[in-house]
Structures are given as C-alpha cells and as structure tokens.
Amino acid sequence: MERKRALTYKDVGVDIEAGERLVDRIKPFAKRTFDKNVLAGIGGFGAGYLMPKGYEEPVLVSGTDGVGTKLKVAQMANVHDTVGIDLVAMCVNDILTVGAKPLFFLDYFATGKLSVDVAADVIKGIAKGCELAGCSLIGGETAEMPDFYPEGEYDLAGFVVGVVERRKYITGERIEPGDVVLGLASSGIHSNGYSLVRKLFFEVLELKIDDYVEELGRKVYEALLEPTKIYVKSILNLIERVEVKGMAHITGGGIPGNLVRVLPKGVNAVIEKGTWKVPPIFKFIQERGNVPEEEMFKTFNMGIGFTVVVSPELEKEALDILESSGERAFKIGKIVEGEGKVVVE
C-alpha cells in the first residue's frame, strides 16, 4: 500500500510561521503608539487599557469602518503604506463628531495568502494614523483565508474606542437658526466614491495606475492614494476653547448626507458653493466623467472633510483656532429655519 504524504496547514495555504514573523515585524510600529494606559499590547489574546483619569462621568464611544475599494487602487499600485492611515481616519473622525478623544485602535487584516511585507506596510500605515490621532494601536487580527480572496488582494477593518465627558457630549440638539457652518479642508477624495473613481479612471479614460495626469500635476496613484485627513488634534483643541454645537465627518453621501445627521428638527443648513476652493481632483472627475454637480456633492466631500457648527459670535475665534492648528478652514454656510435638510446653493 502506497504511503500518503502528510497533509499540513501550510499545504492548503495557511502559513502560521509567516503570521508569527508579521507579529514580530509590527511590534515596534505599535509600541511607538502606546501611552501609559496600555497594559498589554500586540501578541496576546487580549489587549488591556486603563480608563484615563480625570473624567467625572466618562462616556465610551466606539466606531468601526473600512477603506472600501480604495484598497483596489493600493493593490494595483503596489503601494500599501497609506491605506492604514485611511483606516484610522475613517474611524477616529467618526467618533470625533461627538467630542470623543480616541483612546485605542484595533485592526482586522484579511487575505488569501499572507505577504509579510505587504501586511507590514499596511500596519505601519495604521500605526502612523494612530500617531496622528493620538491613540494607541493595541491589537488586531491577521486572517489568512485561502480560496476566499483572490491572490494579491486583502481587506481591512478598523475599530476604535474613545472617551468624552458626558456633559461635553456633542449631539447637535442645540443648533439653532443664526448659527454658522465651518468647513475644514479635505486632503483629497479621502475614502469614499472609489467605485465611481475607478470606473472613470481605469475603464472610461483607460488610464494606467502610473500615468501622469497634467490637470492634477501628479500620477494617477499619487492622486488617488492621498490619505484621508485626520482631524482629531485640531478639533479636540477647538472644543476645549469654544463651544461647538455640532460636527459632521464628511464621508459617503457628501456634505448633504452627513451634516443632516446632526441637525435637530426645525432647522436647515444652507451650504454656499464658492466659499471654498474645490480641489482639482473633483473638477477633473466632474468634467471628464460628465458627472452632474448634484451627484458630485452626494458622492464626494468636494474639498470639505469635516464640518463644525458654532454660534455666529464664535465664528472668527473658531476659524483662528483651527488655522493655528494647521487646518484650512472656511465659513461655508449658515443655519436657518427649516425641516432638517441640507441645501447646497
């Protein structure tokens, strides 16, 4: 009788040793993000984090998100050290809207066959995002799933926990007619609308990933992989110094679809086009793709990545604080009586 060769986990596509090498590779990146409250970090079964002192009635705020099909662009370009920043940004900017300071972050990296180099680049970007957001990367999961993902592809998810004093929790309920809407400039497309973007760039226009685009002054991958802006430090500085009534992270749905989420009944937000400069990437998409302007505002951030609502008497002070924090900020609209809608005019 013929003796059969022993079957191993590695034979079917799961390399446990590669996973262990990855953990060793990423530990230094993660450790740079640790603060004094981290009890246990990368490599264990669970990560511990002490509740920060100084809160009378702390509210924990959690968020989770991904990067969407922007990952396809990263994989086409073989550039993997920026999408981790996007992952952190999408999560921390969300919980920031209620005034929460991000405390710690975990990631989930899933692929068909693990490339230690690729995964390490991705997680290096996640650690960089955590440094920018002032939070600790204390854990994560690497899942190697043969036959589930095509070769060379991976997916990402992120999870963040933050904290805010209950009496400082920002809901938008105090927004009233006469208030002003401030907009913080985005760094580009951020992480939404990439199904449309990829269709335009790679199918309609038949551009290659490293083609130079004159109108953008950059190669395709450089324009499309610009990381999502992280607003945490600037906004936390702002809310420490002035009263902020409501905030919105401008993601899928654009300004109309996100600012509306913090408007109370009885008011509208009127957004005034022309109060900020729309970046060239959006003009390129609109003109070359023949995309209606209304569709552009529903799909993309159009150059505004985060919005803040304050009383009119605080407008100048708030803008000065934001600009001193390194942000480009503008008054982009006002609050009027209405039925809870966002109007772009």
Image: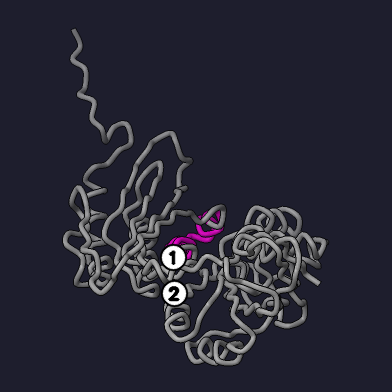
Which of the labelled discs sits on residue 92, or is there none? 1
Label 2: how many residues lie within 10 Å, few (<14), some (14-19) or many (20+)? many
Quarter that holds the N terminus? top left
Q: Mark 1 or 2 closer to N-term?
A: 1
Of 209 and 81, which appears nearest the observer? 81
Q: Quadrant of residue 148?
A: top left
For marks 1 and 2, give the CA distance.
7 Å
Whether 130 is drawn above or below 108: the answer is: below
- For label 1, the SS is helix
* Segment colored magenta: 71-91
Q: Residue 3's spot in the image, x, y percent?
A: 18, 15
In front of the other: 244 or 249: 244
* Image marks 1 and 2: residues in contact by CB distance under 8 Å: yes
Is the residue 9 above or below the residue 2 in the image?
A: below
Q: Is residue 77 left or right of residue 296?
A: left
- Residue appearing at x 46%, y 40% in the figure: 149
Magenta stretch, main secondary structure class = helix
Q: Which residue is mark 2?
A: 232
Q: Is residue 47 left or right of residue 160?
A: left
User: Residue at image x 19%, y 47%?
Assistant: 45
Reply yes or no: does residue 79 show up in magenta.
yes
In percent of width and height, residue 264 lies at 63, 63
Whether residue 293 appears in magenta in the rendering, the answer is: no
